[in-house]
Image (spheres, helix red, strand yellow):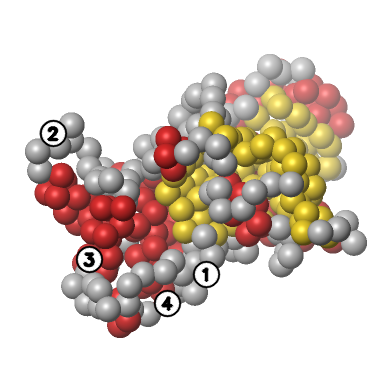
Amino acid sequence: MNQFEAPARTVLKSSEPSIEAKSVSKRYGRYPVLDQVSFKVLPGEVYALAGPNGAGKTTLIRIITGLSFPTGGQMLLCGEDVHTGGSKVRRALGAVVEAPAAFYPHMTGRENLMAHAKLAGGVGFSTDHRNPLLLDENRIREVITDVELTRMQDRNVREYSLGQRQRLGLAAAILTNPRVLVLDEPTSGLDPLGINLVHRVLSGMAATGTAVILSTHHLREVSQYAHRVGILSSGKLLDEVDLGARSSAYRFRVDDAPRAAAALSTQPFVVRSFARPPYVIVHLDSELRAPDAIRALAVEGIRMFEANPDHFDLYEYYRERVEREF
């Protein structure tokens, strides 16, 4: 199996978050840009930041990467303050901020990645450092293949399209196999095939334990592989949507929806249930528990006529949530 075919919503369990924002605030003079923003991203998790223009997404991304200092609060990467942790924190970080990333236009894509590798102190996965150049070249070959730039790798970057520069920026960000990957609008300017490629790469990185955080406007696309979405508006984190939990919701058409909701609420595998006559909506701790929910209804003598996943539209939820603030 290719590493980018790993299940998108599998999170590697860890007690320590890879990214943790603690009451992060940012002001420019008297103007607040971020207001007491707190969240955590675990290893192996994809966390998407969504919000209207001016919500503070790029400012937050810049604070996460250490390019901007918060007015208040603290930003931790792998348990270290990103602004005081020095090279220890930087070695764990891969990022593209305010894409497309800047490259030397007179150099080829491969040459740019080699320069990036040298600045990073050499990359590769072997403990044998007798030939670090070979290790760098092997890894560069891998990431060029991952982002589908093999045919362009020996052409000057000035000849690249916007989408190709976007993919080269992603290659540079994942080059050192970082523990934390931070991307600002990584699919901006990409066609549908390019967007799907980015999704595969990010899912693959998360499957190997990397914590991924990105800002995006492509909510329906990101909902296919992100684990959680943080909704920003006017500098505040309005809501966090757990898409894994949402994918475990079912809609049953029954003869007595209120009684069905009450019966299901007593089951240990049910997160919550509520009536929407003639349906009962149930959120399970795993989508594999759907047959157990059906059996529980049968035991209570409740007749069921139809069972379907209760599909969650992230875009519609986001739109309603943001509009509620205005």
Query: Residue 219 is drawn in which quadrant?
Result: bottom right
Q: What's the distance in space between the residues labelled 3 and 4, CA to CA?
A: 18 Å
Which residue shows up at 36% across the image and 51% down it? Answer: 174
Work out whether residue 313 can be spotted.
no
Q: What's the distance in space between the residues labelled 2 and 1, CA to CA?
A: 39 Å
Residue beneath disc 2: 128
Q: What's the residue type where badge 3 is placed?
A: Glu
Image coordinates of residue 304 in percent, x first then y, are 71, 34
Considering depth in this image, is 260 or 189 the residue closer to the camera?
Answer: 189
Considering depth in this image, is 189 or 111 the residue closer to the camera?
Answer: 111
Give the side of residue 205 with respect to residue 151, left or right.
right
- Please give the count of numbered marks on the rendered protein: 4
Q: Earlier in the sequence, mark 2 or mark 4?
A: 2
Q: Residue furthest bottom?
A: 159
Q: What's the distance in space between the residues labelled 2 and 3, CA to CA?
A: 23 Å
Q: Earlier in the sequence, mark 2 or mark 3?
A: 3
Q: Secondary structure at mark 3?
A: helix
Pointer 4: residues within 10 angstroms few (<14), some, or many (20+)? some
Residue beneath disc 3: 111
Image coordinates of residue 196 in percent, x first then y, are 43, 62
Residue beneath disc 1: 188
Residue beneath disc 4: 162
Considering depth in this image, is 224 or 281 the residue closer to the camera?
Answer: 224
